[in-house]
Image (cartoon, rainbow, N blue to C red):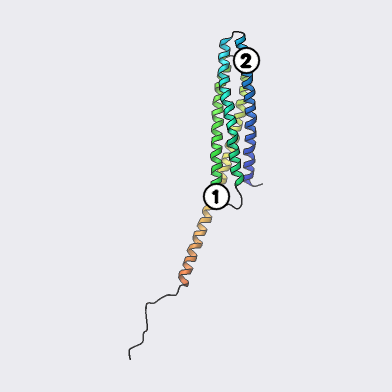
Amino acid sequence: MSRTEEISSDVKAVSAAADEARNRAEEALEYARGEIDLAHEHGWDGVGQSISIAGEALEKIVEELAGSGDVFENAARTLDVISERMSHNEVAEQLGLARAELDTGRDTFLGTAELINEALTGAEQAEHQALGTRLNNLREEVEKLSEQLQQHCAEIDSEQEQAQKMGQQEGEAESRKRDENEEKNDNDEPKDDGGGSSGKPA
């Protein structure tokens, strides 16, 4: 397995883990909704309103994580296109496209972490420890994914830098070869000394 294939495999693993985190967020959302209904049934409107803050944030979290799946799939697909038939410059370009997708995924994780903090504020206001525990576990999961993604971005940067360097060397070698061929052609051409017949008139 090539280095690029390894990175693609790692990105797909992050994508799968993000799906699991989304499932966890959906479970926390359903739990929060149930607790909101329970609070209103007992007339605990203040508690219900606080948990609603967490519920609204969780709705956004589910949407954010659901959208990240396409981002990681695009990144992995871009990496999988890379082959030995490509020039180093083409490889560097593909790596750059994959890196841009992962940047979007990283922004999603950062936004998700902020939303989890917002949800935790609601849970703390309601003094709801069980919901707080779910949210803290979700935050740890997202932070771990963000760290893994950062590592994969660094790996892509390293591969891209190497490909660009080798592409530059290829370009310099081709340029030298062209110059040598042009010089050889110039040397092979017959030289015209500009003189005609040097005979003296009779």
**Residue 138: quadrant of the picture:** top right
Q: Looking at the image, which residue sits at the far bottom? A: 202
Tell me where residue 7 appears, x and y as whole percent.
62, 42
Q: Is residue 137 visible?
A: no
Q: Looking at the image, which residue sits at the far left? A: 201
Question: Residue 160 — which label?
Answer: none
Q: Residue at x 58, y 23 (%)?
A: 59
Reply above or below: 53 against 45.
below
Kind of residue sitting beneath label 1: Glu
Looking at the image, residue 2 sits to the left or right of residue 108; the answer is right
Q: Residues within 10 Å of mark 2 (few under 14, many from 20)?
A: some
Residue wearing tag 2 = 35
Tell me where residue 150 appears, x and y as whole percent.
57, 36
**Residue 198: quadrant of the picture:** bottom left
Reply above or below: 90 against 198.
above
Q: Looking at the image, which residue sits at the far top? A: 43
Reply above or below: 86 against 202.
above
Looking at the image, residue 103 sits to the left or right of residue 2; the answer is left
Return the residue nearer the eye: 45 or 131.
45
Tell me where residue 110 appears, x and y as whole percent.
54, 30
Tell me where residue 5 appears, x and y as whole percent.
64, 44
**Separation of residues labelled 1 and 2 (CA atoms):** 54 Å
Residue wearing tag 1 = 90
Q: Is residue 106 visible?
A: yes
Q: Residues within 10 Å of mark 1 (few under 14, many from 20)?
A: some
Task: Assess whether mark 2 and mark 1 are in contact (beta carbons under 8 angstroms).
Answer: no
Q: Residue at x 56, y 27 (%)?
A: 113
Return the residue nearer the eye: 142 or 154.
142
* Label 1 SS: helix
